[in-house]
Amino acid sequence: MKIAILGTRGIPNNYGGFEQCAEYLSIGLVKKGHRVTVYSPDFNPYKEDTYKGVQIIRKVGLKSFLGNSASNFIYDYLCFKDAVRKDFDIILELGLITSSLSIIFCNHKNKVIVTNLDGLEWKRSKWNNLIQKITKTLEKYGIKHSDYLIADNIGMQKYIHDQYNRNSEFIPYGAIDTATPNPRCLKEYGLVPDNYILTIARLEPENNLEMMFDGYIASGIKTPYYVIGNHVTNYGDFLKDKYRKKGITFLGGIFNKHHLDNIRYYSKYYLHGHSVGGTNPALLEAMATNTFILVHDNQFNKSVVNQNAYYFNSAITLAALLKDNEILQCKVEFAKNNLARIDKAYRWSIVVNQYESYFKRILDNK
């Protein structure tokens, strides 16, 4: 098959979730004999025309002139317009909102457009009411005009069906193999094994950081709390000011995977607050590194960890969990079950096979 992957900042991954998906999926499909092209913005630091057998097509990214949001719409349009003119069997869009206008208005007759929705972008609390309404409308019509849909989470699959009466294929996000545990790198960050609480997240309101911080403070426990993620943002500054001298340390972004694996593994608790849908890669990575997870109570997180975590929906319920040392008795069992779940359903080799199978079924029924 000839497959194009659109909607990301390109490969190799230098940014986040969908870029990681594009990298592992494209390389995996190439290894299975398919011709795969990934579209990339011209500001991606990798400048070669191929990466591990994957073809790369560059289009202008106007981020420095227009800002992220506006430039993403234009970049996605340029990629989509180019892809529909070529002879790809499958055009896979990773993410819906900024590609929705292209899907709606660009002629893609006789082309196969498969869209992976990601999460509920319109629910992000950083958007004002007008932007949320516009984003919800883009979601509606982007779904309507996509030929096929992929949901990486059972909760998202149910949402698509209930909200839009459309079927979608459930294909999860993948998890990467983890390093052998070794605590030596913890000293670099001032961490003591099994004596710290950890969150790894983008510092955005919908990730419920204030709820988790308030719950931690209300618990009165003395275990230090460390947060990994870029905090040099307006919201990051707000959080640092509000929670100054409260036992919470902002470590910033850490991009050394070996270090991250060990920081997760040796945490006492891992707090996960993501709430706006889709399968969050950070949750899979926590599961893959045997962490003891306390997670925000919503259908998206529940469909991933099932009963192998403790759930909170407020600062009060989280505080109660943190004060209850007896829950630690479940740590070994939960960690074992979560790792088994990763091995059964979330390894990239499994995910690649599912994408390949779905694409073949689409073309067989075309």
Image (cartoon, rainbow, N blue to C red):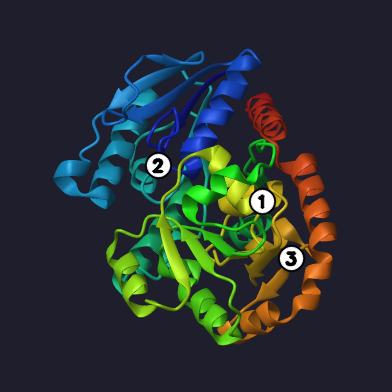
Residue 251, located in which quarter of the rendered image? Answer: bottom left
- The three-letter code of the residue at mark 2 reads Ile
* 2 or 1: mark nearer the eye: 1
Nearest the viewer among 77 and 366 is 77
- Which element carries disc 2, helix, strand or loop? helix
Q: Position of residue 182 (x, y in %)?
A: 66, 42
Nearest the viewer among 256 and 130 is 256
- The three-letter code of the residue at mark 1 reads Tyr
Give me the disc on residue 103: 2
Q: In the image, what residue occupies the spot 56% across and 67% down? A: 273
> As displayed, is residue 243 above or below residue 183?
below
Is 140 on the left-hand or right-hand side of 359? Answer: left
Q: Which residue is mark 1?
A: 265
Is 104 on the left-hand or right-hand side of 281? Answer: left
Q: How many marks?
A: 3
Counting residues from the start of the chain, the first of labels 1 and 3 encountered is 1
- The three-letter code of the residue at mark 3 reads Ala
Q: Position of residue 126 (x, y in %)?
A: 35, 68
Q: Position of residue 55 (x, y in %)?
A: 44, 16
Give me the disc on residue 309: 3
